[in-house]
Image: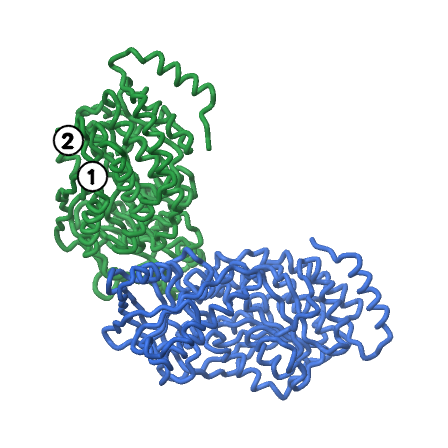
Chain colours: A blue, B green
Amino acid sequence: MRRLPLSLLAASLMLAIGTANAATQTTVPAAAVKSAEQLRDKAMSDNTGYQIVESLTTEVGPRLAGSPADARGREWAIAKFKALGFDKVYTEEVSYPLWERRSEHAEIVAPFPQPLALIALGYSAATPKGGLTAEVVRFDSLDALKKADPASVKGKIVFVDAHMTRQKDGRDYAIGSGVRVGGPVIASKMGAAAFLLRSAGTDAHSRTPHTGVTGFKDPKDAIPAAALSNPDADQLTRVLAYGKPVSIKLDLDCGITGTYKGANVIGEVTGKKHPDQVVVIGGHLDSWDPGTGAIDDGAGVAIAMAAGKLIHDMPQRPDRTIRVIAFANEEMGLWGGRAYAEKHAAEVSKFQLGSESDFGARKVWRMGASVKPEARGAIDQIAKMLAPIGVDYDGKMPGGGGSDLSQMHAKGMAALSLTQDGTDYFDFHHTANDTLDKIDPKELAQNVAVYATFSYMAAQADGDFGSAPGAFANDGAEE
Amino acid sequence: MRRLPLSLLAASLMLAIGTANAATQTTVPAAAVKSAEQLRDKAMSDNTGYQIVESLTTEVGPRLAGSPADARGREWAIAKFKALGFDKVYTEEVSYPLWERRSEHAEIVAPFPQPLALIALGYSAATPKGGLTAEVVRFDSLDALKKADPASVKGKIVFVDAHMTRQKDGRDYAIGSGVRVGGPVIASKMGAAAFLLRSAGTDAHSRTPHTGVTGFKDPKDAIPAAALSNPDADQLTRVLAYGKPVSIKLDLDCGITGTYKGANVIGEVTGKKHPDQVVVIGGHLDSWDPGTGAIDDGAGVAIAMAAGKLIHDMPQRPDRTIRVIAFANEEMGLWGGRAYAEKHAAEVSKFQLGSESDFGARKVWRMGASVKPEARGAIDQIAKMLAPIGVDYDGKMPGGGGSDLSQMHAKGMAALSLTQDGTDYFDFHHTANDTLDKIDPKELAQNVAVYATFSYMAAQADGDFGSAPGAFANDGAEE
């Protein structure tokens, strides 16, 4: 157990005294604080979250957006919300381009013939039938590619070989995802035949390549694009170091085949006092296909569902509605989150507070908030409740709401950021190794405790957190 | 640095004094001991071994016996022996059944459709075109399968789900390889449609299945047989726990297509006094195909080649010949080792001492010896030389000679066992993760030092180690 330093405790007390009579200040009533403490402690030793993610990853497994498993995932979510006793369960349609993966192979043809382990990226084009053979040209970074003479790249397979290292906050993902999203587009514009990157991952010794989406907006611009595992990127670099021309044969069968109609699946615990005002939490239901989408993002769905279920099981319904959203197709471009924000933008003031979990299943260690100044007292109360279970409140960090809910936050929804320990997240992210065994039930329970506690306290607060059209346009949170 | 306890030092000294005048005792002359010490220390900071294994795994990559890469591996070995300056380089033919892997897929069909990561085992039969779908029946152990009613297995896919844990001496491999070699044969006899096992590996969280050979002696008896990765075995067990019939579709395209003529590749540093007497060391040149055969057994080949090279580079040739053998097709049944022993059985008395490295590239920590009693003094001298670099001499442990050379030992060759630290060996063994990055150059150099030192001291010894037809028939070493 971690405790607040005395100085912080004193500051909290002074803040509470100082704001007690200010009618414009948002606060959580004492009775709700007491109930929240019981809820938190119950959640810490409850295994509902783990049971949910075990059920999803076992019964549905991989859930590539638009695949047959996507539909099975929705059926699973509807049934699970109902089985958990949510008051209202419904879906909202989300349409997006249907990208299919069929097969992928690669081999070094010369000078040293041998297979390479790789995986096609989202929205990658297929290679011509029978494959594509071309010389490889390697760059250390995206910047080096940008500065290259297009003539040196034309007709070749561009290989960008940037490294990521493990970080608690996962900040190196900016490097890896930058290469993966931006690199293929740049290479395509420069006339490259295909694009390869060193996987955006921190598992230096594992032959499991990391897939993920590219930035191709128009299928006409797409070229074949894939990720090599880290050891394969090492191997290709060693082969290139012999100084001889290196040619690779790529055989990717994948591409966009039409439009798919999926859906966000939503479960609600109906508020008894303000049913139209909602605290919104969630995760995304789709996953990349090589793994079973346990940490990305079965965990997020499970955390939010379990938090809702624990609030549902309290003696009384909360004052405001708890809305749990299992988003559609986050992976290929926040399709579920964008559709949701478009549909609900006009009601943004009804969104009390929101946060989505989409950074794995390790313990939450940090909280940031984007709320109106008058709601900082309530945020302090939430922070005080979460401190004993290991969450540090960073008053300077904005609350972006998480991946899909970042879109609702961009419309003006007050939001939190709840950061999990991401040290090993990018070892497994978007790979075959994203499986249930990566989740520690006790760490997952801490996440459920965090989400249940903040959701309940926000639902019971006297006052709001400042949601309004465009309210947090310049808070610095990522969208 | 580790040092001999004083009591052992005293014992060694007394032994040396006590045996100095006994003409029948084998000893290493003082000048050779001094040269061996210099050789050992030079080897500890020499990177020839790492350069060799880097060259093999980069330029040839995976080397499945009988594949096109097998021939490239032989060409590589011949060229490398010559480049290193060995006095004599030659090959000896080895014939064996040619088993080919073409493709492998598996999926759970019901109740929860999803793909499974698996790899076909050596000598596995193919499934019928279009795949084989059958119900799964699970057993905790090979014993449980043996005790099962054949009627409960007939027409089904047998799944044996035995676990291995990490051990320094790798002893749990007896469990895993027991299931992999014996299980398919037993299942076939009981009428099973196919055989699956939990990979014989200790990487509990990696989706990289472990291949390896089965015990099928006659292709007519072979059924489709494959290994699931550990997380996939967990997943299948979870699915089975729902209590509903579980069916799997297996699609394995592989099988025996003929006979292949490969070869052991041999390099020698010719002895100046007794060129016909040989110290023999080696590794196996073939590897399983998912990885690049770095720890199994590029390392062994590199350790032995580098040891030979370091002895070659001494001011004078050794008294006896140092023979380095890169064996053919160890993986599918010691074909290279058996062919070698058959061919050279009559000359067994000329084999001074032998040992093969085939347990990875971690530091050697233990030595055992099967030698005549009169050679224990020389073994003590070798042990004393290896103790400072971390090798404990276990006087009760037999010296089996290693995988292929176990066959020559069985004919009567005096032999050592030099055990590497195998704690993480079965994380990578026979998987896609057996790649160069698993080898630490400093640990590999310690191996080279061990092999160079013992080889040189044995080559210079006054007297032999007891090799003779059938000399060590009952020493307890594994064949």
Give the vertical position of B412 relative to A55 (above or below).
Answer: above
Picture quadrant where residue A381 is located:
bottom right
Q: Are marks 2 and 1 on the same chain?
A: yes
Residue B306, given in percent of the width and then of the height, sits at 29, 41
Give the vertical position of A305 relative to A190 (above or below).
Answer: above
Q: Is label 2 in contact with label 1 (beta carbons under 8 Å)? A: no
Query: Marks 2 and 1, Cα distance to the nearest angstrom?
Result: 12 Å
Q: Residue at x 16, y 42 (%)?
A: B89
- Chain under callout 1: B
Residue A96, given in percent of the width and then of the height, sits at 44, 82
- Crowdedness near tag 1: few (<14), some (14–19) or many (≥20) residues, C-alpha within 10 Å: many
Amino acid identity at mark 1: Gly
Q: Residue at x 25, y 23 (%)?
A: B465
Classify the position of the C terminus of chain B by image quarter: top left
Q: Quick one: which residue is furthest to the bottom in this view?
A: A346
Amino acid identity at mark 2: Ala
- Crowdedness near tag 2: few (<14), some (14–19) or many (≥20) residues, C-alpha within 10 Å: many
Q: Which residue is mark 1?
A: B337
Q: Mark 2 falls on what kind of element? A: helix
**Mark sitting on residue B345:** 2
